Image (cartoon, rainbow, N blue to C red):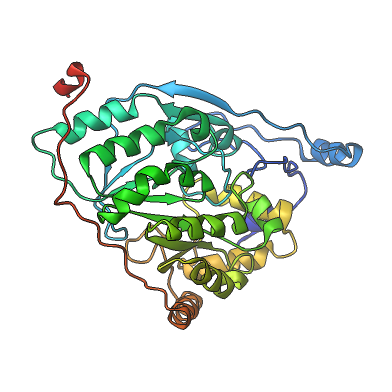
Amino acid sequence: MPPDRDDDASVRTTGLPRARKGRGAVSNIAHRFERVVREADGDALDAARLEEDEALPPLATEVSFETVRSLLAYNDSPDIYFDRSINPYRGCEHGCIYCYARPTHSYLNLSPGLDFETKLVAKRNAAEVLRAELAAPSYRPDVINLGSATDAYQPIERELRITRQVVEVLAETKHPFAITTKSSLVERDLDLLAPLAADGLTAVYVSITTLDTSLARRLEPRCPSPRRRLRTVATLARAGVPVCVNVAPIIPFVTEPDLERIVAAAAEAGARGAFYTVLRLPWEVAPLFREWLATHFPERAQRVLARVREMRGGRDYDAAFRSRMKGEGPWAGLIRQRFEKSCARHGLLHERFVLRSDLFVPPRSRTPQLDLF
């Protein structure tokens, strides 16, 4: 389905801000709850672009702290294998332009654009609250996904170590959990993960979008390089930690040509399985991604968006269960066939690791006040 006139205008380069080094989004678009919408003067932006040869100054990362009353987030989605998750941070410095979690920054009255990757919130008491939730008499253990929305091992974790504290609680209680990450920082916690993996209590899912380093710097600017992530897969596998690679998201004509090469590289690195999702553009992610395309790939923007809409019933996004992760239609079917054949060729599984919950031991809360929650 061809894009309408408004969509044509949204991918023209005229009036678009320039990309900043180390950041994925190229602007701070208004979030969907904002009442006042401001538009930049396109002529002024074009004139400034012609006059300024040097790159825009970098934006510093700001971190604020939040004291939370609950940590476990529950869901009943049939599309995902877990019904509870933990995200120690709001926002993500990795800056992946396609991140489906960007719209959550709107609830903080911040932009899903540059604010999402520069104005972060850390849940300072995450470990204490988790301990209290796991100690509740009514609690029943099942797999927790760590980092389902924002990466639990993003750069600020190196200093803050909130994720490390959460993993320590899960290790102490022998609670099953899976980690989804793009970060090599997960290797730091191998002293905890390896023994847990030996008991069937943990697994790691490493996301790899492309093997093209130059493209990765534009798509996900503060993530480890694709090759570095493959080394992480190998390191985890050698330590006995079950690893799957998420080929995600598959973006038509951008990352899609790399599909078979990623699967082959994952198998060579020691991954046991692989999964994929196609590009999702919910809420503010759609205009942000169109803006990114117009900035970095203006010559193919219309082609990419047309193919995305073809898989989404003519829309930027279709949130329907069962199809939102993989899309529908002939092109989505072709992607599925290519992926399945590639996995079969390299002996990679499509099934999630089964983790044990029978070893769980409820903790005793170290903070008496939290026992009231």
Reply above or below: 362 against 325.
above
Would residue 363 be found to the left or right of residue 65 on screen?
A: left
Compared with 211, 165 (above or below) is: above
Question: Residue at left 31%, top 54%?
Answer: 197
Quarter the C terminus occupies: top left
Q: Give how far across and how far down residue 264 sits, in percent.
A: 54, 74
Q: Is residue 54 visible?
A: yes
Asked if residue 65 lies left or right of residue 138, the reply is right
If the image is split into quadrants, where does the N terminus sit?
A: bottom right
Q: Residue at x 73, y 51 (%)?
A: 295
Total residue callouts: 0
Closer to the camera, 271 or 79?
271
Viewer-proximal residue, 248 or 76?
248
Residue extending furthest top?
369
- The quadrant in which residue 230 appears is bottom right
Query: Where 115 sits versus 75, above or below?
Result: above
From the top left corner, tell me how far across and down residue 10 is, in percent.
66, 52
Q: Nearer the viewer, residue 227 or 130?
A: 227
Residue extending furthest toward the left: 137
Q: Residue at x 67, y 51 (%)?
A: 217
- Residue 318 place in picture, x, y as percent: 42, 60
The image quarter in which residue 72 lies: top left
Q: Residue at x 47, y 35 (%)?
A: 105
Q: Is residue 280 at all visible to an observer of this figure?
A: no
